[in-house]
């Protein structure tokens, strides 16, 4: 008994000092992440009279505007992640290959700035550039291409995809570049020495090594696109119904006062999707790490 | 008291007593409360301003002003200065009575106001709220009953018989446009002209934003629809989208400045503020009430939370906003030092006329017109002669929202 207790005391005190510096972090995440998640989940199972109910989930699981919002949100985040991850991976490769030293560092900084742009300022930027009176629009018109001759508008699904790509592509560059840079020269040389063609090297070695990192980055882009809110809100008027925008009108509006619990249920739906994406990200990250550690 | 939770000396039953102790605590607390009631009853002169329900039981205007000045502060919430002329109302109130107003989160939402009433620390609770009408009945138990002097002039449809909430003002849907465009629109029908290609925008998702919803009602009315069915309004926007006139950009000030649209539909009471804001950015905009549809929204409502930290100032603010006086504005009013409360109150503009000057239709408008106490609306905000003013009922609005939820997203036709 005594031995066990002594043992556990040593262990727990050791753990205690290890945890103490992390305390502010735990308080922070507890207050801003864990507590809200619990509160939102609990409220999503309550009705307006504070009774327990599953009714808030019904509109999400049956065809209708709320179900449709999830479809549009998923479609938007998948499309922009595909565009972002493919273009971004290509750019990352080119940058690793050709931009070294200081130039590479400059590109890193630029990517970081663009990857973190978003919200209303980003929407403003695009309207100022590609709107009817935008600078780019005018420039193209002078060159003989009238963007607005047909049905083009940035205030649409296509427009939002265009705007989202603006932060998705550089984000991909940022997170995928280390994976490409991690491909060792020796692997390539060894393959060639063993008689492989460069194509075979990519097919059998390069791409298989990069796939987990690529998939992980894709999940990250997906989660970012899925949760983005302000940009799409500033660009549309319910014509691209995304889940976070609908949650906004339900819980922070001026008109609908009795459906905040439905907003909470939609939020739980988003949490579930984001959790799946994050699980995919972590799983892919572990697979990718195998190569780095060997 | 709640912050003292856990303090051993707190008689608060929530203070973590063991069960036996709790009982004693309750008895002591009850006795204390009972003796307090007895004291206030014996001193008839001291008025509990958190309980008085009209000006008379608040001791009359002189006493109310004195008590409000003693409190010295008023917490308001979510009142943009350029919304319905609230800037002028707040300036005048502060200057005339020397009471400092704190406006929390001017650009917040009704939902935020209610949330704040429920959760803010005692001293930060708003003394009055101005929220969408659905938030009144829904949260009536949060508000203290109070009936202003002009209570009978408030349209009965829009007030709680018990006096816990009351309509304050409404707007009509106006066309707002950049005066630099070739043609000045006067009606919804005008906007179908190819001259307006890529120019017309709406202020939000009509199934969730009131201004946008009422814009659809107005378009519907202009095309021969009735308030019971907004199909013709949806068709109007759908056709406008096909012709390229309707851009599905969010009509907010910022997108306007970025050049995303030139014409939109707005509450009349946002007009004067929007015109001033645009002027600062070097743009000239104009508001006009459309000749083919005058839609008046359901009014916003006002209420005093029962836990208002400055109960006398809250009641004075409410009396001020519901006053029909025609008097001095914040620029004309000089020093009011030494004047009695009722004298100050009689000398200044009442809130109802301040709202009219801001392009709004105050809740006592009809009564004021009958009594000829109404100020004249600013130029451009007059209702076109002979126009019928229509207000969709809550049931109409619910039906419209359901129809829009199903049909509106398809309009974009990406």
Image (tube, coloured by chain):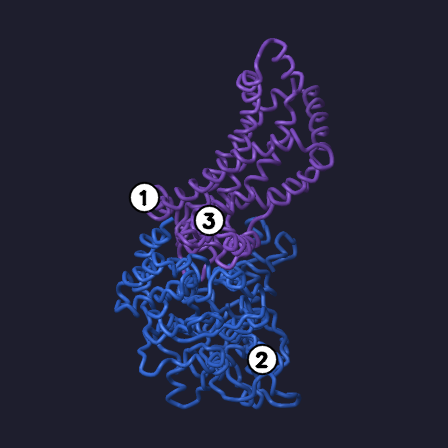
Residue at image mark 2: B93
In front of the other: label 1 or label 2? 1
Q: Quadrant of the N terminus of chain B?
A: bottom right
Instruction: Residue A159: give its label.
Output: 3
Count all numbered tags in the image, as a single digit. 3
**Quick one: SS at disc 2?**
helix
Q: Colour of chain B?
A: blue
Q: Is residue B23 visible?
A: no
Q: Position of residue B54 (x, y in %)?
A: 47, 80
For mark 1, name the chain: A
Do the residues marked 2 and 3 share a common chain? no
Crowd rating for badge 1 (residues with CA inside 10 Å; few <14, some 14–19, many 20+):
few
Q: Chain of mark 3?
A: A
Instruction: Give the answer, above or below, for where B30 lies relative to A122.
Output: below
What is the CA distance from the residue labelled 3 to the residue labelled 1? 26 Å
- The disc, 3 or 1, on the residue closer to the chain's N-terminal end is 1
Q: Residue at x 66, y 40 (%)?
A: A25
User: Disc 3 or disc 1, which is closer to the eye?
Assistant: 3
Please rate how many residues cluster around mark 2, counting C-alpha atoms within 10 Å: few if below 14, some from 14 to 19, many from 20. many
Instruction: Report x, y in % for residue B38.
Output: 54, 74
């Amino acid at each position: 008994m005594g031995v066990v207790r002594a043992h556990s005391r040593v262990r727990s005190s050791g753990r205690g000092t290890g945890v103490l510096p992390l305390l502010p972090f735990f308080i922070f995440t507890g207050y801003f992440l864990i507590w809200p998640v619990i509160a939102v989940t609990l409220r999503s199972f309550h009705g307006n009279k504070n009774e327990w109910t599953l009714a808030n989930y019904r509109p999400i699981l049956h065809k209708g505007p709320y179900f449709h919002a999830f479809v549009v949100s998923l479609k938007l985040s998948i499309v922009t992640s595909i565009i972002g991850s493919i273009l971004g991976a290509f750019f990352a490769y080119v940058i690793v290959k050709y931009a070294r030293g200081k130039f590479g560092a400059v590109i890193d900084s630029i990517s970081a700035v663009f990857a973190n742009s978003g919200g209303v300022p980003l929407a403003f930027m695009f309207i100022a550039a590609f709107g009817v009176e935008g600078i780019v629009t005018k420039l193209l018109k002078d060159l003989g291409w009238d963007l607005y001759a047909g049905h083009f508008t940035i205030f649409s699904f296509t427009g939002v995809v265009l705007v989202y790509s603006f932060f998705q592509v550089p984000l991909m560059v940022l997170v995928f570049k280390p994976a490409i840079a991690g491909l060792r020269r020796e692997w390539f040389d060894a393959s060639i020495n063993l008689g492989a063609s460069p194509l075979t090297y990519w097919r059998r070695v390069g791409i298989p090594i990069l796939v987990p990192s690529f998939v992980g980055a894709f999940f990250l882009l997906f989660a970012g696109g899925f949760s983005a809110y302000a940009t799409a809100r500033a660009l549309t008027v319910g014509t691209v119904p995304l889940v976070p925008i609908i949650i906004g009108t339900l819980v922070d509006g001026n008109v609908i006062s009795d459906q905040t619990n439905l907003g909470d249920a939609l939020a739980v739906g988003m949490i579930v999707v984001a959790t799946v994406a994050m699980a995919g990200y972590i799983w892919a990250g572990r697979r990718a790490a195998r190569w780095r550690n060997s | 008291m709640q912050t003292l939770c856990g303090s051993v000396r707190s008689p608060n039953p929530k203070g973590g007593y063991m069960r036996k102790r709790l009982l004693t605590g309750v008895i002591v607390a009850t006795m204390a409360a009972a003796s307090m009631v007895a004291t206030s009853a014996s001193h008839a002169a001291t008025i509990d301003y958190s309980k008085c329900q009209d000006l008379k039981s608040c001791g009359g205007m002189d006493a109310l002003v004195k008590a409000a000045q003693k409190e010295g502060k008023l917490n308001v919430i979510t009142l943009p200065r350029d919304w319905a002329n609230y800037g002028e109302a707040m300036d005048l109130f502060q200057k005339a009575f020397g009471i400092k107003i704190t406006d929390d989160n001017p650009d917040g939402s009704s939902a935020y106001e209610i949330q704040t009433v429920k959760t803010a620390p005692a001293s930060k609770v708003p003394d009055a709220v101005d929220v969408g009408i659905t938030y009144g009945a829904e949260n009536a138990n949060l508000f203290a009953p109070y009936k202003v002097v002009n209570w009978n002039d408030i349209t009965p449809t829009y007030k709680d018989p018990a006096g816990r909430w009351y309509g304050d003002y409404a707007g009509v849907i106006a066309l707002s446009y950049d005066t630099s465009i070739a043609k000045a629109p006067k009606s919804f029908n005008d906007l179908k002209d190819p001259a307006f290609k890529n120019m017309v925008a709406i202020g939000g998702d009509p199934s969730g934003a009131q201004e946008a919803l009422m814009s659809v009602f107005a378009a519907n009315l202009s095309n021969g629809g009735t308030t019971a069915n907004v199909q013709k309004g949806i068709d109007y926007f759908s056709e406008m989208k096909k012709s390229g006139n309707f851009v599905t950009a969010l009509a907010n000030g910022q997108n306007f400045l970025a050049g995303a649209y030139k014409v939109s539909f707005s509450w009349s009471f946002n007009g004067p503020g929007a015109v001033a804001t645009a002027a600062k950015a070097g743009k000239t905009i104009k508001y006009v009430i459309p000749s083919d549809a005058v839609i008046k929204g359901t009014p916003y409502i006002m209420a005093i939370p029962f836990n208002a930290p400055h109960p006398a100032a809250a009641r004075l603010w409410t009396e001020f906003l519901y006053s029909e006086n025609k008097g001095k504005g914040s620029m004309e009013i000089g020093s009011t030092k030494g004047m009695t409360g009722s004298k100050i109150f009689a000398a200044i503009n009442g809130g109802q006329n301040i709202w009219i000057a801001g392009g709004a239709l105050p809740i006592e408008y009809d009564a004021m017109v009958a009594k000829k106490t109404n100020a004249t609306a600013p130029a451009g905000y007059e209702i076109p002669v002979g126009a019928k003013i229509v207000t969709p009922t809550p049931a109409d609005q619910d039906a419209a929202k359901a129809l829009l939820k199903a049909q509106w997203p398809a309009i974009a036709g990406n």
